[in-house]
Amino acid sequence: MTKLLVAIADQIRHEGFAFVQSPQMGPVLEGSGLSEWRSFAASWDDLGVDTYMADGGRYRRRRFAAFRAARAGIVRKPHQPHYQSRDYNPLNGGVERWFEPVTETMAHHPALAAIFHTCRSLFDRLTPPDMRPEAWHVETHQFRIEAREGEKGHPTPEGMHRDGVDWVLVLMVRRENVASGETTIYDLRKRPVGSFTLTAPLDSALVDDSRVYHGVTPVTPLDPTRPAYRDVLVVTFRRE
């Protein structure tokens, strides 16, 4: 494990989260084999509309996939629904949500493989040996949040929340013509303990889901005559 990754682990252990900017996250991921970023980012142009939004919004696009991550490697699981209880997602929880699957090309993309390898190494280190699983259940979400004149895009429409997993990575892929999208981290008493904005590709938020809540403010278009969107990758690790 690199010194940079050890420093990130130490920050998460101390604070419950880490905001890692691109100049630090880039070398970590490149050390795990990150490559072909342009084609990886371009895949966000081919996401389906999230039709499960209980607020009636059509501002979110996404693809979803589940994997099994172990020391022997990472294997994609059969396509399955994404489920959260209403305890964790009072807006959209309580139902099985069948999203369009991540494409096979993206599931085997070297950039995603590098992200998975980095996460597994980091989250294994952060998990006590007696609680460390042989394999993690990994869920991967490609999100595009769109904003239009008179219609904000909501990255976390459920508000301040936890995801009901062990660990969360939110990685910025692209911001186009949007303002705001500030991430705030809260302790278990729901008091704010940190805030930052993911702006550059590879800017990342890493979260210990058992210790903190998180939420992101809505995005609005800077120029309402042009497309405006926020693309992120969310990866969650949960003990099987």
Image (cartoon, rainbow, N blue to C red):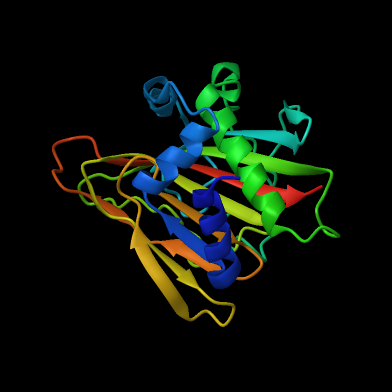
Could you tell me which residue is drawn at 55 percent across and 36 percent down? Answer: 115
Q: Using residue 8 as the reference point, say whether residue 149 is left or right of it.
A: left
- Snapshot quadrant of residue 104: top right
Instruction: Pick the residue in front: 204 or 48.
Output: 204
Could you tell me which residue is drawn at 55 percent across and 68 percent down? Answer: 213
Could you tell me which residue is drawn at 82 percent across and 47 percent down? Answer: 240
In percent of width and height, residue 187 lies at 54, 77
The relative height of residue 94 versus residue 117 in the rendered view (above or below) is below
The relative height of residue 183 versus residue 95 in the rendered view (above or below) is below
In percent of width and height, residue 107 lies at 60, 24
Please indicate, yes or no, whether residue 84 appears anywhere in the rendered image: no
In percent of width and height, residue 135 lies at 80, 41
Could you tell me which residue is drawn at 35 percent across and 45 percent down? Answer: 23
In percent of width and height, residue 160 lies at 50, 67
Pick the quarter of the image with the N terminus: top right
The relative height of residue 208 versus residue 37 in the rendered view (above or below) is below
